[in-house]
Image (cartoon, rainbow, N blue to C red):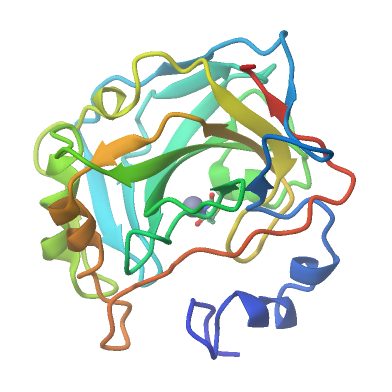
């Protein structure tokens, strides 16, 4: 089968052919985060703020892999995640984005059915597990919380100066398969809201093949603002088939018996 993507021929509705878990899995991601009614997110007063330790990255590769753009620091990076619903310390692996070709679509998670124009994913793996010692091993480990992904919605507003070094680089990785070494330092902490207190959390999966059900998801309530120009820069990145990557988001999956916890009322 042609490699997976987001077109009619190789998009989310076809992924089950190579990844049966797409249709048989009971903890697939993303989901629609419902805030009222029966299956709504339930406030859990035990949920603490998420703690990130993200010293500015000094060496990283920025890559267009044909289905997203990802920022991957060199192996020596010491960035870590803990707190929130987590009982272990997680190591930062990479961040990437999902976006649409207009402002009414693009995020993977939804809130009461509403999509945001984009979603930022910060991918981490449990660095304290005796069962694996790398991101790739974590993905294949069958550990229910091998990974933790922080999700931040993007909404259109003022220009985001902290993300500008990233959005200014998009034109340099326009062609699928192209990558650049990130010039200078990048301060990811400056991109995030000050306090990481208000979030939804639930057990889910990777949102792309292999769709492994190994992710503790933490999706923050507060969106990050970016300008229209910055959104347009994402929409100019090509997918390797002469078309821009647009709509690299998977539709929401059934909740099944899962519950979603909220760290806020
Ligand atoms: O949160 C996710 N977003 C994605 O594109 C999926 C993924 C798959 C492999 C590596 C990193 C991320 S899982
Ligand atoms: Zn993602």
Query: For residue 260, what is the image quadrant?
Result: top right
Closest to the observer: 55 or 15? Answer: 15
Q: Residue at (27%, 29%) from the top-left corner?
A: 191
Q: Residue at (18%, 36%) from the top-left corner?
A: 160
> Where residue 66 sits in the image (x, y, percent)?
36, 72
Query: For residue 87, what is the image quadrant?
Result: top right
Closest to the observer: 135 or 44? Answer: 44
Vertical relation: 20 (above or below) 91 = below
Closest to the observer: 245 or 115? Answer: 115
Vertical relation: 25 (above or below) 230 = below
Q: Residue at (40%, 60%) from the top-left corner?
A: 104
Closest to the observer: 93 or 15? Answer: 15
> Where residue 233 sits in the image (x, y, percent)?
17, 60
Q: Quick one: which residue is furthest to the right in this view?
A: 257
Q: Is residue 164 left or right of residue 144?
A: left
Query: For residue 48, what is the image quadrant?
Result: top right
Q: The C terminus lies in which quarter of the figure?
A: top right
Q: Is residue 49 left or right of residue 68?
A: right
- Count of marks overlaid on the render: 0
Vertical relation: 50 (above or below) 209 = above
Q: Residue at (60%, 53%) from the top-left corner?
A: 113
> Where residue 134 sits in the image (x, y, percent)?
56, 40
Q: Is residue 19 left or right of residue 259?
A: left
> Where residue 53 sits in the image (x, y, percent)?
40, 16
Q: The N terminus lies in which quarter of the figure?
A: bottom right
Vertical relation: 91 (above or below) 61 = above
């Amino acid at each position: 089968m042609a490699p997976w993507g987001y077109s009619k021929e190789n998009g989310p509705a076809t992924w089950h052919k190579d990844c049966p878990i797409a249709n048989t899995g009971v903890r697939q991601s993303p989901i629609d985060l419902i805030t009222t009614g029966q299956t709504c997110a339930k406030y859990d007063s035990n949920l603490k703020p998420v703690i990130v330790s993200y010293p500015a990255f000094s060496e990283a590769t920025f890559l267009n892999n044909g289905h997203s753009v990802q920022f991957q620091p060199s192996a020596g990076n010491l960035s870590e995640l803990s707190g929130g619903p987590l009982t272990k310390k997680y190591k930062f692996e990479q961040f990437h984005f999902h976006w649409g070709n207009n402002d009414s679509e693009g995020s993977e998670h939804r809130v009461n059915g509403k999509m945001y124009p984009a979603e930022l994913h910060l991918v981490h793996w449990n660095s304290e597990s005796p069962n694996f010692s790398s991101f790739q091993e974590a993905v294949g480990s069958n550990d229910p919380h091998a990974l933790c992904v922080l999700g931040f919605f993007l909404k259109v507003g003022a220009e985001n100066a902290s993300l500008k070094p990233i959005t200014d680089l998009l034109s340099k990785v326009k062609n699928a398969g192209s990558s650049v070494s990130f010039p200078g330092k990048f301060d990811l902490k400056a991109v995030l809201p000050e306090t990481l207190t208000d979030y939804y959390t639930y057990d889910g999966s990777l949102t792309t093949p292999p769709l492994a059900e190994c992710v503790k998801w933490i999706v923050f309530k507060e969106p990050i603002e970016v300008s229209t120009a910055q959104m347009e820069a994402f929409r100019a990145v090509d997918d390797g088939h002469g078309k821009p990557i647009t709509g690299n988001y998977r539709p929401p999956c059934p909740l099944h018996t899962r519950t979603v916890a909220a760290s806020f009322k």
